[in-house]
Amino acid sequence: MSPRYRRVLWVALVLNAVMFFVEIGGGLQSGSVSLLADAVDFAGDAANYGLSLAVLSMGLAWRARAAWVKGVTMGVYGILVLAKTAWAASLGIPPEPMTMGLVALLALAVNVGVAIMLYAWRNGDANMRSVWLCSRNDAIGNVAVALAALGVFGTGSAWPDLLVAGVMATLALTASVTVVRHARAELVLAVPLH
């Protein structure tokens, strides 16, 4: 594996770990479910980058297994976000939009930077593809959270925040299916049945 890819993964890991704490703080301060969902996603991505680094020089079977674990993790994240969104919907308290929007824009800048760094490896093996999909989904999610902040500001309602949290959960679930299928196909190639 290229030393450049390894360096990019390290930078992505550190940025995602820092943004986890920033978004937890912003989500708790603003009361935004979509920011808290994105914070959990940042933590998951940091762990995924660490896992990718751990298996980078290993064979295809190990990289495919790591991608499978990441795919399942994305699916669990999606299910948890849907549950948290349903809970917040029952409470109906709108988040504070200014903090929500500013943190979302900072997160967007970080995720776009990481996605640009990883773009060259987006069509690699299942492990590389899962890293790219995580970054792409995160940038899309950040745009959606910023738009939700505008919606909350304009309507005074929690629904824009809840809608975005639901969309983020759906993105995680669809990416999960893609990565798990790709990883399973690579495992079949790497570990043929006798």
Image (spheres, rainbow, N blue to C red):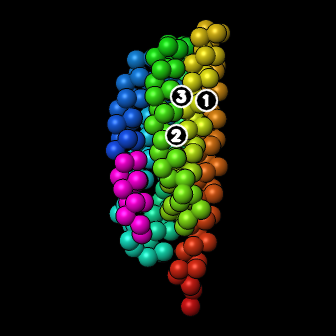
Vertically, is 86 above or below 150? below
Query: Which residues are drawn in magenta?
Result: 1-12
- The tag on residue 84 is none
The magenta stretch spans residue 10: yes
Question: Counting residues from the N terminus, which is met first, the one under dot 2 or under dot 3?
Answer: 3
Label 1, secondary structure: give it. helix
| Residue 88 drawn at (x, y percent) | 55, 23
| Residue 177 drawn at (x, y percent) | 63, 56
Callout 2 touching callout 1 (CB < 8 Å): no
Residue designated by label 1: 144
| Residue 108 drawn at (x, y percent) | 51, 33
- The amino acid type found where label 1 is placed reads Ala
Q: Residue at x 57, y 86 (%)?
A: 193
Label 3, secondary structure: give it. helix
The magenta stretch spans residue 76: no
Q: Residue at x 45, y 63 (%)?
A: 66
- The amino acid type found where label 2 is placed reads Val
Question: Magenta stretch mostly in which secondary structure?
Answer: helix
Label 2, secondary structure: give it. helix
Q: Nearer the viewer, mark 2 or mark 1?
A: 2
Callout 1 touching callout 3 (CB < 8 Å): yes
- The amino acid type found where label 3 is placed reads Ser
Question: Counting residues from the N terminus, which is met first, the one under dot 2 or under dot 1?
Answer: 2
Q: Nearer the viewer, mark 2 or mark 3?
A: 2
CA gap, disc 1 to disc 3? 9 Å
Of the 4 image quadrants, the one containing the C terminus is bottom right
Residue designated by label 2: 112
Residue designated by label 3: 34
